[in-house]
Structure formats: structure tokens, C-alpha cells
Amino acid sequence: MDYDLAIIGAGPSGLSFACSLHDSGLNIAVIEKQSRQLLADPPIDGRDIALTHLSRKLMQQQGSWQRIDSRHISPIQRAEVIDGESPYTLNFDTPSDDTDALGFLISNFRIRKAIFEEFDKLENATLMDATEVSQVSSDDRGATVSLASGDSIRTSMIVAADTRFSASRRQMGISSGLHDFGRTAIVCWMKHALSHDQTAFECFHYGRTLAVLPMPGDMSSIVVTAPTDQAEAIIDMKRATFNQDIEKRLNGRLGAMQQKGKRYPYPLVGVHANRFFAQRFALIGDAAVGMHPVTAHGFNLGLSGQDLLAGEMSSSISQGRDFWDPAGLSRYQQKHMLSTRPLYHGTNSIVSLFTNDSLPATLLRKAALRLSNNLPPVKWAITQKLMAKNQVNSILPTLLHR
């Protein structure tokens, strides 16, 4: 065998998975289409990630969290969900125990850079950058990764982290459910006159959704979600008009708004694989589950999923079994399915409810907000899911936008 393990995809999930196996004794290859230069110094892409407590814990264990300057980490202390022009809001506050925040907002490019820096010091992992995979296959003797260059790699097992449109997943015969929301998220940064007080806002306006997430200082991350046929008009909107539009949709909560940097569009498609493993093969990250961002859990599920798989593989090794042992992969699938399926389908239901402008739907979501606000057990459950302190957690999803 050329390697014990081949990881396809050097995004945060793939690199974190390699880091989680740093003391496994496995000889690992990580295969990535992008160049090492782009991985080491990722460009700003407008995306900011609301990390859960579990994600912070996993990044701390790997050492990548410590590589991010604390000045670039913004704690989310409070969240408000706003429905249309209604003055009624659903509020979430940081619990009055020793919890320091609901979550932690960090720019995507900073997270990627920190995880790559930690990966880059591994002694048991080799990065094959600027390398494209053309085919994967496996049998009872091993697995093969065929490259676009014509070369091939023999390995004992393959783990795919090659996006929600994973070619490896299809080639291994694993089907998936795909949900095209017909909507596009437009993201950017904005400066504002009034303090956000570390509060995240989710505004469900008719035909359009606005999320405002607190960044360090007087800045916020803005996410406008609209039908895709309206996205180009929003991207092309003059800055002064865009600033006024966001200020109006927030009802002046943050005062005058001023866009900083570019606007970036991201079409929204959800994917959930129907299985997470095959013979000597497993899925992690978006290749396993690609979420709509409305519950803030897509990135977090990627980190928790790789940790579950690494734990099962390490357990098999310590007990003298093959690390690709089907029983261990099956346990990974069972645990990750328990966490992801309720979130995925619950998220899709939330999106359907809060983007439906019919009278029954608007009445139902107003009732849902009041019910959640006035029933402490329901509100507690949503808050716990928002923070996600534990690994396997099947409580219904939150309403906070990433």
C-alpha cells in the first residue's frame, strides 16, 4: 500500500480529520485540488461561522483554536428572531451558569488558516495539493484513488470530504437526498453606528431573510437570503441603496449601516447522504451532510462528524482491529445519523415555514415564535441545541442563522 489512509478534500473537515489521527500511527495522504498556497493563506470569502461550544472544544484539542487571535473571536451573547414587521421577537440569552456565550463568530478564512497551520506540522500526513481525483474504488483487499494525471494511489481506506456535490460519494454507490432551495445567500460585512451588544439578529421578512451576526467592534456579518432570481439585483445594488435597505430591514436597531468590502453570492443547496460508509470508505463534512445555513450547524456538523469517525477508527486500532472495520464504521454512521437527520429535516421544515408568505404559514410561524418564547422547556431545548456542548445531540434545531 502507498498509504494507510487517503483523505479526499483539504477543507476544514478533511484537515481536522487528519489532525484527529495525529497519534494513530497511520500514514495519511490528503488529496486536494487547490494549491498549498491557497490552503495556507485562504482569501476572504465573506463568510463568517457561528461555532458551537463543541466545535471550540474540538479545535482547542487539536490546537487550531489557539492559533486564532482572540481579537478576531466574537462571542454571541444574545440572539433575536424577528418575524416581518411584528414588534414581537423570540429572544435567546446566554444561560446564567458558567456558560460564556451562546456561540462564537469567526471569519471562515481565519478558521481555515488556523486548521491548515495545525495540519501542516503533522508528521504522519502528506499533502498532495493541486491534484485532482478522477475515480475511487475499493474491494476486500484495499482501495484505489485514480488521479487525473493518470497516476493512482493504493490505500487501505478512503475518506471523502470533497464537498456536498461529492463525486467520490456517487462513484462508491452512495445515494443522497438533495434539496435545491431556489435561493441564494448574499454575504458581506457592514459597519454600524450603534453597538450590536454581541447580539445576533435573524429577520424573516416576506420574500427575504436577513441575518446579522456580531463581529468584533462596530462590525457585523450580513447574510441576505433571497430567491435566486433576485440575487443578481441585490449584488448589483448601489452601496448607498444597499446600506439604506439593510438599515430599514433592521428597523434602525444598529443605526446607520455602511458596507465594507465586497458582496459574495452563495446558492443554497442541501444534501444528506443516505449512508455514511461503504467498503473501506467513509464520508465526512459536506460530503456526508451539507446544510442550509439557517440553523448555523453545517460547519459544526463537519467538525463533530470527523471527530466521531476518528474516535471509532482509533478505538478499532487500540483494540487490535482493522481501522476500516465495518462494525466501527457502522457505529460512526449510527451516531452521526442520530445527530444530523433531525437537524437536516428540521432545518428544511424551518426554511419552508419561514419563507412561505401564505396567510396560514405566517400565522403558524407567529404562533411558533410565541410558543417557543413562552414555554421554558422548549426555549431551553433550543438554546442547548444552539450551543451544542455535547457530541451527539438530537434536540430540534435552532433558528439562528449562520
Image (spheres, rainbow, N blue to C red):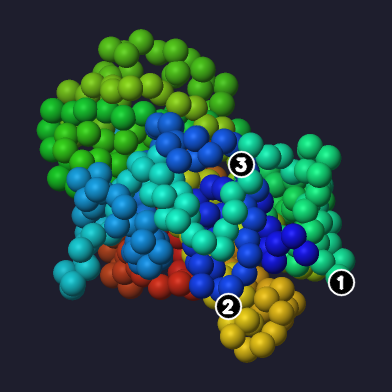
Q: Which quadrant would the N terminus be assigned to in this image?
A: bottom right
Task: Find the distance from the CA under tag 1 to the CA under tag 2.
Answer: 21 Å
Q: Residue at x 56, y 74 (%)?
A: 24
Q: Image check: 226 left or right of 126? A: left
**Secondary element type, mark 2:** helix
Q: Is label 1 in a helix, a strand or a loop?
A: loop
Find residue 257 and report its horizontal and vertical position in percent: 22, 24
Q: Which residue is mark 2?
A: 314
Q: Is residue 191 left or right of residue 49?
A: left
The numbered mark, 3 or 1, whose residue comes first in the sequence reads 3
Give residue 7's position: percent from left, percent from top: 65, 56
Question: Please, what is the three-letter code of the amino acid marked with disc 2?
Answer: Ser
Q: Residues within 10 Å of mark 1 (few under 14, many from 20)?
A: few
Residue at 66% in and 88% down: 320
Residue 52 visible in this rendered orientation of the protein: no
> Which residue is tagged 1?
140
Whether residue 303 is situated above or below residue 224 in the rendered picture: below
Please give the label number shown on residue 129: 3
Q: Residue at x 58, y 82 (%)?
A: 315
The three-letter code of the residue at mark 1 reads Asp
At x 43% / y 31%, what residue is drawn? 43
- Would you say the residues marked 3 and 2 are in contact, meaning their CB atoms lie under 8 Å apart? no
Query: Disc 1 or 2, which lies upstream in sequence?
Result: 1
The amino acid beneath tag 3 is: Asp
Mark 3–mark 2 Cα distance, whole angstroms, equals 26 Å
User: Which of these two is toward me, 400 or 187?
Assistant: 187
State the SS at label 3.
loop
**In front of the other: 180 or 20:** 20
Q: Position of residue 183 (x, y in %)?
A: 55, 32
